[in-house]
Image (cartoon, helix red, strand yellow):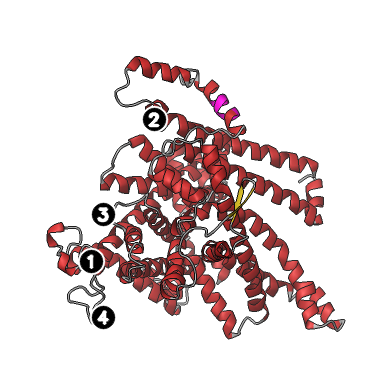
Amino acid sequence: MADAIQAAPAPHSTPTTWAGRFFDSDVWASFKRSKLTMVAAFLTALFMASAILAGLLSPQDPFDPAQLELMNSRLPPIWDAEGQMPFVLGTDEQGRDIFSAILYGLRISLAVGILGVALSATLGITLGLVAGYLGGTVDAIIMRIADVQLTFPAILIALLVDGVVKAVLGGQLDEVTTLSVLVFSIGLSFWVQYARTVRGSVMVEKNKDYIAAARLIGLPTPVIMFRHVLPNVLGPVLVIATINLALAVITEATLSFLGTGMPETMPSLGTLIRIGNNYLFSGEWWIVAFPGIALAVLVLAINLLGDWLRDALNPKLR
Amino acid sequence: MFAFVIRRALQAIGVLLAVGIISFAMFRFAGDPVNQIVSLDTPAAEREQVRRSLGLDDPVPVQFARYLSRAVQGEFGVSYQFRQPVSDLLAERMPATLELAFCATLFAIGFGVLMGVYSGLKRDSFLAKVFQTISLIGISLPTFLIGILLIYLFSVILGWLPSFGRGDTVRLGWWSTGLLTTSGLKALIMPSITLGLFQMTLIMRIVRAEMLEVLRTDYIKFARARGLSTRAIHFGHALKNTLVPVITIVGLQFGSVIAFAIITETVFQWPGMGLLFVQAVQNVDIPIMAAYLMLVALIFVLINLAVDILYTIVDPRLRTSIRQPA
């Protein structure tokens, strides 16, 4: 593909470095054209950065009991007359700073989302590759499982997996195990889309000449599958992964909101919303509102980015 | 067409069998059923006796066959939390969920079609842009946030609507309905909107796209040339043809509505099957989880089958294409 572009008579010289090629690409051009996409990308980057730098940015560690003062509980945001520095967005029942809690929660939400997407993508790509390349019975079995799973909404699968894994592990789980269970259940509920897409592309790709050539020189099947076919079917996967990141974040938040996700000792955005929901009627709206806004903006930004990427990588729409 | 229906029915049975296996595996292997019955200090011999009396020492295929035949008769064992038969619990909660799903679907169809037609006909108007924004929100906001937002607006600030429960219900035989009392109807409003919003945006987008497409076709131009009134063209000719995909979506999505009711029911503490299921997941109550999975699978499969059959009846083109060998 890259060779074909370079061989074609270009209107200007094609840069050879990786970064140069990127800034010269159609994708970058379409990015520069869309203001909304730039805002979405900025917001996503901002969220990622604040999640990584949560320890530096937040005025307190909201989950270190030594730093909490009951005197500071239920303070409204700073613009309210009763607001106090440094609690910009107010505090909750236990005197935790909402802003700090959001930063730490964002870290958990994004970590579960990204790991969940990584797991489902790995699973889906591998199964799709195997199904598409080998065909026959293997293909039939994998795709029938995919069909059955596709009948149910992902959130239901995630809830079921979550419940079953907890039943198998038994007893009270610590925070890291809970996080892994969440990643596992999200990974298991979203693999189908990757598998179907990859399988479709593999079936086209495997009849091309370069694969025949690779077979002819006697390369083993796994090498052909992963070194030759795989790189050529990854384009659409990127789009699915971006859109699924938003879905995975929502799924994690939903599970945590339903009380089957992250515990209150290590809350994600969903857990924060669940806690805040209990104070809605006593007038402390900020405990639920700010984590809710953070979640909504994060999801919206990632969604917009995914939509743009889908259009930018799809030559039919240009 | 008959062969098509048979093939579909066989596929449906295949799906149900697969779900049955998963459900059985959960029931049998995730957590030992014996432990749920005996106490911690029960001697091993007695445990063995309980095990045998439950038939847990039979070969696994025999156990599976027994599990399936019981499930077909509506028996799913006893809930660990409530010590009541799961079938009774589900039957008690089912009317609440079905009424909620029904009202949510009605809301989605009503507003979705109206907004879709409007933004299809006047796509550059201000109101059409407002509808587009609403649909973007409906798709990207998590369901539970929409529910919380509605509760805050209409229960906390305005105090118009109840924030939880079904209100007063009336019993009609074994079916308890909230549709016949004022408080029951009031309690239905917010959960229905929360649950139906996603479907509404879906329907709105489809109707809008279909309207735009249909309005360009020759038969609409011909209808205009015949001098028919705009209203007759839009609603008599154009809208009718946009409704086939709407019927499909509504049908296929009804199962999702029931599954997504899990979230809505938790936000509004709606005493339906979804809330029961969430509590089961929280408390690792496997019999309820297994039964809920089977029930939802059955509903999904029946709906898909019904939509497939309806489709061949509604759309004659499909019938001929099925009759011809592919």
| Residue receiving disc 4 | A80
Vertically, is B112 above or below B92? below
Residue at label 3?
A266
Q: Report the amino acid beneath label 2.
A: Gln
Determine the residue positioned at 62% across, 32% down.
B73
Which amino acid type corresponds to the residue marked 1 in the rendered image? Ser
**Mark nearer the N terminus (3 vs 1):** 1
Q: Residue A32: percent from the left, percent from the top?
A: 42, 77
Mark nearer the viewer, 1 or 2: 2
Looking at the figure, which quarter contains the C terminus of chain A? bottom right
How far apart marks 1 and 4 lie (CA) works out to 19 Å
Name of the residue lying farthest toward the right: B226
* Numbered badge on residue B251: none
Q: Subunit of mark 1?
A: A
Q: Main secondary structure of the magenta part?
A: helix
Answer few, some or many: residues within 10 Å of disc 4's Cα (few below 14, many 20 plus, some between 14 and 19): few
Badge 3: residue crowd in 10 Å (few <14, some 14–19, many ≥20): some
Q: Looking at the picture, which amino acid does disc 3 mark?
A: Met
Q: Which amino acid is tagged 4?
A: Asp
Mark 2 vs 3: CB contact within 8 A: no
Distance from the alpha carbon under mark 4 to that under mark 3: 28 Å
Q: Which residues are magenta?
A: B64-69
Q: Mark 4 belongs to which subunit?
A: A
Q: Position of residue A30 (x, y in %)?
A: 46, 74
Res. A6 in view? no
- Label 4 element class: loop
**Labels 1 and 4: the sequence-earlier one:** 4
* Chain holding disc 3: A
Q: Which residue was labeled with disc 2?
A: B36
Q: Is residue B252 left or right of residue A114?
A: right
- Identify the residue at horizontal 49%, vertical 44% (top origin): A129
